[in-house]
């Protein structure tokens, strides 16, 4: 938690499963070859490159227009983002994975300026403290999950095709993307960060709290 030492951490959360939304169907790894795909982060772009796509860096608010004009062949976003940019009206294919696997996920943190927190009277600090932590994270998670239901529902209502890759094809993608971690480990090592340890710690926490549910 050293990275949060300079801020007042309120909570952390993730969005729902990331997936492909594409102009043409993506039903196997070979379909991705050469596709211009918007990735949501540096790591996702590394992965897209490993998978054979052409990653495109672009702010999320440019995705709708880029898809409609053919600048992008596909984008990677969770279902809950779909309604905001009317993605379900622009493209008509969505690709998910077997076994509850996601293409990717991203983490978020809600933080407060530490000096501003310190200036608050005790009663207001108590309000923030009582609404921080797991309860706040759970509320964010519930909102993201509800948004996913809405986004997917709009795609279904539009008559779009939702392609779920089977277990064998999902494993093929995992193997093809295996180099993503090594590339990221090397990149963050230059900043003095032990990426491999961070990944192992994250996996252990996911496993711990998944079993606790």
Image: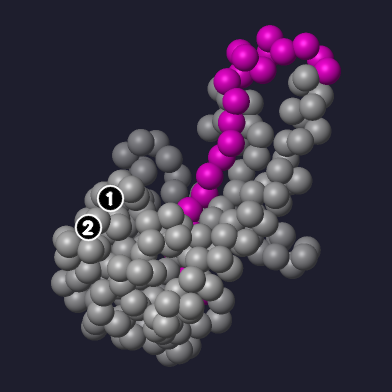
CB-based contact (under 8 Å), mark 1 and mark 2:
yes
Horizontally, residue 115 falls left or right of residue 136, namely left
On the rendered image, what quadrant is the N terminus found in?
Answer: top right
**Percent of width and height locating residue 177:** 34, 70
- C-alpha distance separating marks 1 and 2: 6 Å
Quarter residue 204 falls in: bottom right
Q: Which residues are magenta?
A: 101-123
Mark sitting on residue 66 = 2
Q: Is residue 128 above or below residue 195?
A: above
Q: Is residue 6 left or right of residue 56?
A: right
Residue displayed at 65% across by 40% down: 11
The reply to whether residue 16 is visible in this rendering is no
Q: Is residue 31 left or right of residue 121?
A: left
| Residue 5: x %, y % from top left | 59, 26
User: Which residue is depicted at the point 24% across and 83% down?
Assistant: 30
Residue at 71% from the left image edge and 43% from the top image edge: 136
Q: Secondary structure at mark 1?
A: helix
x 29%, y 55%: residue = 63
Q: Is residue 117 magenta?
A: yes
Q: What is the image's colouring? A: one colour
Within-10-Å neighbours for mark 1: few <14, some 14–19, many 20+: few
> Is residue 34 in view from this perspective?
yes
Residue 159, image x, y percentages: 42, 82
- Give whichever of 186, 138 is nearer the camera: 138
On whether residue 91 falls in the magenta region, the answer is no
Numbered label attached to residue 79: none
Instruction: Please identify the quadrant where the C terminus is shown.
Output: bottom right
Say what secondary structure mark 2 lies in: helix
Tell me if residue 3 comes above or below residue 73 in the rendering: above
- What is the x, y in percent for residue 208? 71, 61
Q: Of the numbered discs in the image, which one, if any, rests on residue 62?
A: 1
Number of other residues with Cα within 10 Å of mark 2, as a class: few under 14, some 14 to 19, many 20 or more: some
């Amino acid at each position: 938690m050293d990275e949060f030492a300079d801020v007042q951490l309120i909570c952390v959360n993730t969005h729902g499963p990331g997936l492909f939304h594409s102009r043409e169907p993506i039903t196997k790894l070979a379909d991705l070859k050469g596709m211009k795909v918007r990735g949501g982060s540096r790591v996702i772009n590394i992965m897209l490159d490993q998978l054979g796509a052409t990653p495109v860096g672009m702010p999320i608010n440019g995705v709708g227009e880029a898809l409609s004009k053919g600048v992008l062949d596909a984008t990677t976003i969770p279902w809950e983002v779909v309604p905001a940019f009317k993605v379900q009206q622009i493209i008509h294919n969505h690709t998910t994975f077997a076994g509850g696997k996601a293409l990717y996920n991203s983490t978020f943190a809600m933080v407060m300026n530490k000096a501003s927190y310190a200036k608050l009277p005790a009663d207001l600090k108590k309000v923030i403290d009582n609404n921080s932590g797991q309860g706040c994270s759970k509320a964010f998670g519930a909102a993201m999950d509800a948004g996913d239901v809405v986004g997917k529902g709009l795609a279904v209502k539009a008559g779009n095709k939702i392609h779920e890759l089977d277990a064998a094809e999902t494993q093929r993608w995992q193997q093809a993307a295996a180099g993503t971690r090594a590339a990221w480990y090397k990149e963050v090592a230059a900043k003095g960060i032990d990426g491999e340890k961070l990944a192992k710690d994250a996996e252990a926490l996911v496993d711990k709290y998944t079993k606790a549910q």
